[in-house]
Image (cartoon, rainbow, N blue to C red):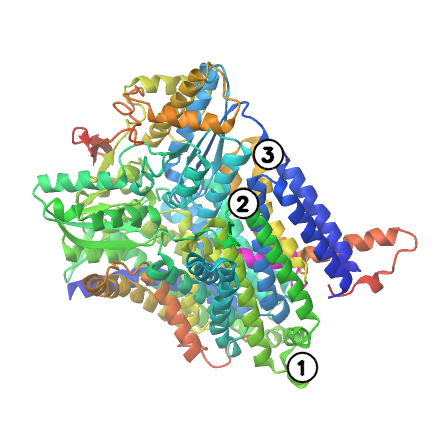
């Protein structure tokens, strides 16, 4: 039982970061119809910027804030310089251009900070506590709780504030939004800024858990099953799907893989099922696409194409 | 009509491009060897770059000979260090460039996957090859007479750790490795050889994980539930950082884990702090900065050049440089002090001289080098992280 | 395809074949890689350029071709292994493509992404067929008693295959099926109105595109004597999409230009960088240039290198007295 609880904790902690990143992707997609492959790169870049800021001697809170602001700027820059000229381009081309951004940002980080994993500053205190037999480090706990709070806070902002309302208008019906005086293209820039900023904070939290390396960008690809499961346009769906996927991966690693492997080792010469947790999200994705293309939480017709 | 023109343009462009970019090497197949060329590839960028000191070390030794000793037998050595990026296709491409365009007399290459994929071609091409990989699957003086490795195989290193566990009264061992050739290959060899059972131990579990892993918390929980007396890790430093970090997350101590030769890195105690205390690993080469004669040469070299990665892997590279240079030097000496005219006979001679190296003094980086077995040395010792430093905790153990 | 195009193609292929014996191994290997990439890009172009469906599973399809051909080659089937590898990949392509009749655009792209990762995983664990992570060693195929095991022989074989695929697609474009591809890409409703069976057309696009990808994969397996999961990763799929974007989607010769460009650009940057002795920055520079290239082409020249070539040519002819008017020469290539 303790084992299951441990797995749940691990799954939720990682899942909460997935959620945070998936929300960013959904936000951009809702507002501008762009599927942003570069979100993983924003995550990585945010973590590197926090690292660089604290190297300059800034206290953690300031360093994260500075990274957030810089990332928001990069988001706006990406939207204005790269995506705005592609307004009328086919979906395929837009996807590819964001992939181009991913490659470029990764290369920049490689050039500046090198290929080796780096020591990320300790933002949260060391130590651990035991709850119902579950061993949790403070670091783990804070990162998980913070990302869930951030995700919820963001959903609240989107739902209850004036800016959030304008965002929703612009996303829902750009023409009508224009007609009632909402500057839709500014709203799109704002969405990119918020999304990149969110990714930056997500990256920082992820780096406190996993350390700082170029590999942080890989999380962008795991986010795609999350957003499809969540229904592409549903922010709440992304949150739930992110947590679900984190749990799923954790249970695959902790229960499913060992079970299958014990069975295989007893009866065959095969001893490993390999990186099963990496494909489980995609297998689920295929199933969902075939059975319920609008996602688990999406509505019919939410596909913009 | 337009396609004709387009094609003409493209063909013209293609030809010019090819001619411009690749002219230096084309047609060089027939040219006789005029210089001593050594071609190396490392992982300058890519997932394993933290260990790249070893390709710098080998390159720098030849540069040291050029700058301080006038080269080998009065000939400057032409070195080329390329970036294989830990990518198989890139490494296969580089190998062809080294053998054919660079007319190298000695080639040194990186990943276990690449060396294993190339092993038959290396025999066919008859090119002396220094592998950075210590896989037993590329060590075979009879079938693979041109491949040399610089120390105990990964499998032998694992056996050293297993025996140490047995001596301390341990009963069960778990093995962890990434899902690439470097990880899975050696573990498979040991599993299938029955060595674990022969040592008197029980294999509690084998856990494979993605090479580019970022999070292994659930695997650590699985490990915790199997409760082994030791966990042997056949991985590189970046994955080891993840393993020890996530072990701390679930309350597994670092002293449970034993790594191999590629886990001696200042990054581990630096990034994990107390979480790295007690972690043990296999050491083959002397530390950078150790009080040995080779270090004096390195210090002399350092006055004029910058050394990018000052660690135990740089020492490994320097060691490889010494033995490769010695074989080349002996081959030239046997030929009356002249470089053989024909690159093929030059390569063959270097291979022969390499296998005749016995009890070679390598400035203390390892006790001595013997290449009749194509392995250089089979000695290793166990080191442990104490107060943020790697400290030897055993004598030199012969891995054979 | 016009007869003149065909003749030029023959001439180019013959010229390349004629020079291969004089190339050194490394250059021969580069020729092989460019030819293989060209075949793969032609295959993807059939789907993306002609049918409007993006696919991120090209590398995985090539992998299926390579593993099938490798196993058959080792069983002694010689060069017949190559078309059979193509058939296996064609089958897989149709299986992946079937959902495409329901999914469009973005969802299809994500589905192919899933297919890529799942197939890559299968390559790693289906040990009996793929030899897992070590990869499947492929013995050189023999033709009439002669083993094809030399880099120059690979180059000749790859160029010959490329010529066959290129001219085959040229012929296809002139058929009713080829034309219906274009109509489906532009507007499915119009296609239906014209009496084109959209589902059937897409089925053929997947089948043919997969077949060609399989051939490219089979050739790459034979040339490297190894089929290994790492060689058919997602990054390679991205490379292929980049090739057709850089070369020019929907054109016949564009993918060839794109393949040459994307394959040789890192090589060129590498050689230039070596002059300045900065190995640690080089790799970053190569990636950076690659990413920037994709972005710049998509923003400024979505029709790729083919359009650049055409514009250059127009400028040249326009400056000459008696040159043809631009309108007369901008035919679809």
Q: How far apart in space, not on screen, are marks 2 and 1 (Cα)? A: 49 Å
In the image, B84 versus C174, the foreground residue is C174
> For the residue labelled by badge 1, is the local secondary structure a helix, a strand or a loop?
helix
Tag in front: 2 or 3: 2
The residue beneath circle 1 is C190
Q: Visible in this render: residue C295? A: no
Residue at the limit of the structure toward the left, as seen here: B169
Which numbered tag is attached to residue C151? 2
Local crowd at mark 3 within 10 Å, few (<14), some, or many (≥20)? Answer: some
Q: Is residue C250 rendered magenta in the image?
A: yes
Please tell me in which quadrant of the rendered image residue C24 appears.
top right
Please give left or right for residue A139 compared with residue C5 in the image: left
Label 2: chain letter = C
Residue ID at (72%, 53%): C11
Image location (x, y in percent) of residue A139 = 27, 52
- Labels 2, 1: one chain: yes
Q: Which residues are magenta?
A: C239-251
Discs 2 and 3 share one subunit: no
Q: Quadrant of residue A93?
A: bottom right
Which dot marks residue B25?
3
Placement of C83 over or under B306, stated as above or below: below
Which residue, as the protein is rendered here, is positioned at the far front? C145
Q: Position of residue B230 (x, y in %)?
A: 16, 46
Whether the magenta-drawn stretch holds residue A303 is answered as no
Instruction: Indicate left or right for B177 with C301 as reference.
Output: left
Badge 3 marks a residue whose secondary structure is: helix
Q: Mark 1 and mark 3 in contact? Answer it, CB < 8 Å.
A: no
Query: Along the line of sight, which residue is nearer the eye, A133 or A63?
Result: A133
Majority secondary structure of magenta residues:
helix
Q: Is residue B297 above or below residue C13?
A: above
Q: Chain of mark 1?
A: C
């Amino acid at each position: 039982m303790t084992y299951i609880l441990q797995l749940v904790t691990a799954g939720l902690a990682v899942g909460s970061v997935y959620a945070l990143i998936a929300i960013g992707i959904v936000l951009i997609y809702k507002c501008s119809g762009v599927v942003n492959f570069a979100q993983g790169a924003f995550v990585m870049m945010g973590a590197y910027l926090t690292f660089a800021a604290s190297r300059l001697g800034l206290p953690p809170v300031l360093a994260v804030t500075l990274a957030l602001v810089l990332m928001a700027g990069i988001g706006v820059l990406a939207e204005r310089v790269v995506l705005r000229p592609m307004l009328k381009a086919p979906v395929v081309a837009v996807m590819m251009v964001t992939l181009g951004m991913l490659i470029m940002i990764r290369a920049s980080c490689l050039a500046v900070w090198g290929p080796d994993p780096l020591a990320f500053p300790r933002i949260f205190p060391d130590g651990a506590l035991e709850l119902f037999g579950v061993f949790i480090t403070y670091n783990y706990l804070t990162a998980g709780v913070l990302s869930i709070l951030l995700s919820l806070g963001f959903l609240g902002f989107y739902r209850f504030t004036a800016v959030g309302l304008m965002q929703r208008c612009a996303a829902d019906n750009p023409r009508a939004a224009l007609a009632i005086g909402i500057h839709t293209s500014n709203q799109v820039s704002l969405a990119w800024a918020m999304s990149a900023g969110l990714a930056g904070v997500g990256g920082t939290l992820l780096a406190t858990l996993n350390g700082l390396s170029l590999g942080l960008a890989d999380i962008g690809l795991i986010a795609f099953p999350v957003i499809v499961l969540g229904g592409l346009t549903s922010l709440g769906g992304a949150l739930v799907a992110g947590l679900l996927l984190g749990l799923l991966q954790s249970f695959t690693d902790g229960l499913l893989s060992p079970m299958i492997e014990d069975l295989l080792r007893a009866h065959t010469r095969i001893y490993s099922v390999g990186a099963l947790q990496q494909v489980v999200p995609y297998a689920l994705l295929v199933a969902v696409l075939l059975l319920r293309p609008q996602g688990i939480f999406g509505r019919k017709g939410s596909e913009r194409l | 009509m337009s396609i004709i023109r387009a094609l003409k343009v493209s063909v013209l462009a293609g030809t010019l491009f090819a001619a411009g970019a690749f002219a230096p090497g084309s047609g060089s197949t027939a040219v006789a060897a005029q210089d001593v060329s050594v071609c190396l590839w490392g992982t300058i960028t890519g997932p394993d770059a933290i260990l790249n000191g070893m390709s710098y070390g080998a390159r720098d030794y030849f540069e040291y000979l050029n700058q301080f000793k006038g080269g080998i037998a009065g000939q400057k050595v032409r070195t080329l260090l390329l970036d294989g990026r830990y990518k198989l296709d890139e490494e296969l491409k580089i190998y062809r460039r080294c053998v054919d365009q660079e007319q190298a007399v000695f080639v040194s290459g990186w990943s276990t996957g690449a060396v294993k994929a190339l092993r038959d071609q290396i025999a066919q091409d008859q090119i002396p090859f220094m592998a950075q990989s210590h896989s037993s699957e590329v060590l075979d003086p009879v079938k693979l007479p041109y491949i040399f490795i610089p120390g105990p195989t990964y499998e032998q290193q694992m056996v050293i750790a297993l025996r140490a566990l047995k001596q301390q009264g341990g009963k069960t061992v778990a093995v962890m490795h990434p899902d690439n050739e470097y990880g899975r290959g050696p573990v498979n060899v040991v599993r299938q050889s029955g060595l674990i059972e022969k040592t008197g131990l029980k294999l509690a579990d084998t856990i494979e994980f993605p090479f580019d892993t970022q999070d292994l918390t659930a695997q650590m929980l699985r490990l915790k539930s199997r409760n082994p007396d030791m966990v042997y890790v056949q991985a590189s430093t970046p994955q080891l950082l993840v393993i020890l970090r996530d072990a701390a997350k679930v309350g597994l101590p670092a002293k449970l884990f034993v790594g191999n030769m590629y886990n001696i890195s200042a990054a581990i105690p630096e990034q994990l702090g107390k979480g790295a205390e007690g972690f043990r690993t296999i050491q083959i080469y002397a530390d950078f900065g150790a009080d040995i004669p080779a270090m004096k040469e390195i210090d002399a070299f350092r006055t004029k050049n910058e050394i990018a990665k000052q660690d135990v892997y740089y020492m490994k590279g320097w060691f490889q440089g010494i033995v490769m240079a010695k074989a080349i030097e002996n081959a030239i000496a046997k030929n009356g002090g002249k470089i053989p005219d024909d690159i093929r006979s030059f390569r063959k001679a270097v291979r022969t001289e390499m296998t005749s190296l016995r009890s070679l003094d390598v400035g203390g980086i390892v006790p001595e080098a013997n290449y009749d077995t194509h392995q250089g040395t089979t000695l290793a010792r166990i080191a442990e992280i104490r107060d943020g430093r790697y400290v030897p905790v055993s004598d030199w153990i012969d891995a054979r | 395809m016009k007869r003149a195009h065909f003749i030029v193609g023959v001439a180019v292929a013959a010229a390349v074949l004629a020079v291969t014996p004089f190339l050194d191994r490394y250059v021969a290997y580069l020729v092989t890689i460019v030819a293989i990439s060209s075949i793969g890009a032609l295959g993807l172009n059939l789907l993306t350029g002609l049918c409007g469906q993006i696919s991120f599973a090209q590398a995985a399809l090539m992998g299926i071709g390579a593993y099938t051909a490798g196993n058959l080659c080792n069983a002694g089937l010689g060069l017949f292994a190559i078309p059979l590898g193509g058939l296996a990949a064609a089958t897989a392509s149709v299986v992946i493509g079937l959902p495409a009749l329901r999914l469009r655009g973005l969802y299809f792209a994500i589905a192919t992404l899933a297919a890529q990762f799942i197939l890559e995983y299968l390559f790693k664990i289906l040990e009996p067929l793929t030899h897992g992570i070590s990869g499947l060693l492929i013995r050189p195929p023999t033709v009439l008693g002669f083993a094809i095991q030399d880099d120059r022989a690979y180059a000749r074989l790859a160029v010959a295959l490329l010529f066959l695929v290129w001219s085959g697609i040229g012929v296809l474009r002139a058929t009713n099926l080829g034309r219906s591809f274009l109509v489906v890409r532009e507007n499915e409703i119009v296609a239906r109105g014209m009496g084109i069976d959209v589902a059937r057309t897409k089925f053929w696009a997947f089948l043919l595109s997969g077949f060609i990808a399989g051939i490219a994969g089979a050739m790459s397996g034979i040339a490297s004597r190894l089929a290994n999961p790492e060689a058919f990763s997602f990054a390679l799929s991205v490379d292929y999409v980049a090739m057709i974007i850089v070369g020019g989607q929907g054109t016949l010769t564009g993918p060839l230009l794109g393949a040459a460009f994307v394959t040789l650009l890192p090589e060129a940057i590498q050689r230039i960088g070596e002059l300045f002795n900065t190995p640690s920055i080089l790799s970053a520079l190569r990636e950076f240039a690659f990413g920037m290239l994709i972005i710049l082409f998509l923003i400024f020249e979505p029709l790729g290198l083919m359009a650049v070539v055409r514009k250059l040519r127009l400028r040249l002819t326009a400056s000459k007295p008696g040159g043809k008017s631009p309108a007369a020469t901008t035919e679809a290539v």
